[in-house]
Image (cartoon, coloured by chain):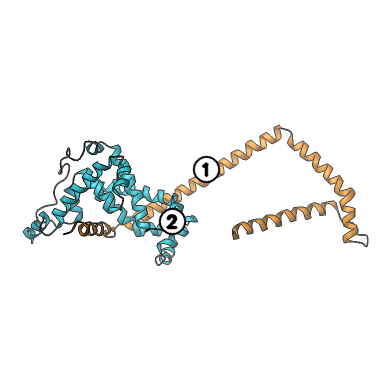
Amino acid sequence: MAESSFEFQLERMFAESPAAPDRELFTLRVVERLDRGWTARRVLIGAMGALGGVIGAYEIIGAGVTGQVAAYFVQANDFLARHVAASVSGALAPGGIYVDVQAIWLAGALAIVAAGFGLARLVREI
Amino acid sequence: MNTQRTLAGVHDLELVTLGRTGDRAAFGELVRRHSSAVRALLRRMGADGATADDLAQDAFLAGFEQISEFRGEGAFRTWISRIAARSYARRWRREARAELLADGPDADDPQAGFGVGAGADARIDLDDALKTLSDPERVCVSLCYGVGLSHAEAAAALNAPLGTVKSHVKRGLDKLRSHLSPDGDGGQRRQVSG
């Protein structure tokens, strides 16, 4: 028998293996370990996220950022009330209906949400 | 069960694609299809039943983690078998048996640790023939002919000199040829038993 022919036969013999009678049980064990791993990973990521969130919130409060942000919001609210609300009212409702500042904030928030949805859709398509 | 029935007709490559997205049911189907071959390979390399099962499980879990590295250029079975075989090679190398490899091909006893077969009336097949090889020969032959590694790749997996691996493979092949060919020991044994 030629060397190459024997080696070829040997490879074929290695490739031939009968199905193990307990392969369903073996598969079940592997899938269970996969599921356990994914659950553990999710819990770990969630816990790390929560911990990071708490630490972040503590740092933000400690640094006095909330007060600054609140001040910015008050300034922005005043600006909207004095300039933007009147302009929008004039443009959208010439008859004299006043557009509230809260409505502008709400419209802005909805626009951000819509942009978020659009971005998520775009990423999924790509 | 319905999922398994649905996936039964799906090609390996499609299952791999699904597995990449985290579909554990799809990967489970790959395990169902190929676990017998991986476990048989590990046993042929010399692992006992429990060790072979443990290593095969670990190999499939590692395969799931690394599935993005599978390009589909070869068969999934070959890819996952190589992960398992390399894992066994690492384990084998760490154990005392690796000393046999370091001693070189002339230092080991061809029958060390193995009987020649299950008895005079036993049917000689590859599994029995492999038992007549020494540990290093068995591992080297399995790496090269069981999962298709080159001599150099097998040497790297075993962290052994290339020449040593080549020697073990040659000696292992000679023994297998004598046991598996009709004119060899196996043929005589079959005639006796028949």
Helix or strand or loop: what does disc 2 sit on? loop
Q: Amino acid at mark 2?
A: Arg
The chain to which mark 1 is attached is: A
* Residue A46 visible in image: yes
Q: Position of residue B102 (x, y in %)?
A: 24, 36
Q: Position of residue B50 (x, y in %)?
A: 29, 47
For label 2, the crowd category at 10 Å Cα-Cα, with few meaning under 14, some 14 to 19 and many 20 or more, is few
Question: Considering depth in this image, is A44 or B62 the residue closer to the camera?
Answer: B62
Q: Amino acid at mark 1?
A: Leu
Q: Are labels 2 and 1 assigned to the same chain?
A: no
Q: Position of residue B171 (x, y in %)?
A: 18, 47
Check residue B71 in the rendering and tell me which mark sits there, or answer none. 2
The chain to which mark 2 is attached is: B
Q: Is residue B130 above or below residue B182?
A: above
Q: Residue at x 43, y 60 (%)?
A: B15
Helix or strand or loop: what does disc 1 sit on? helix
Q: Position of residue B61 (x, y in %)?
A: 40, 49
Which mark lies nearer to you, 2 or 1?
2
Check residue A114 in the rendering and tell me which mark sits there, or answer none. none
- Location of mark 1 (residue): A44
Q: Which chain can be seen in cyan?
A: B
Q: Report whether B88 appears left or right of A46.
A: left
Which quarter shows the C terminus of chain B? bottom left
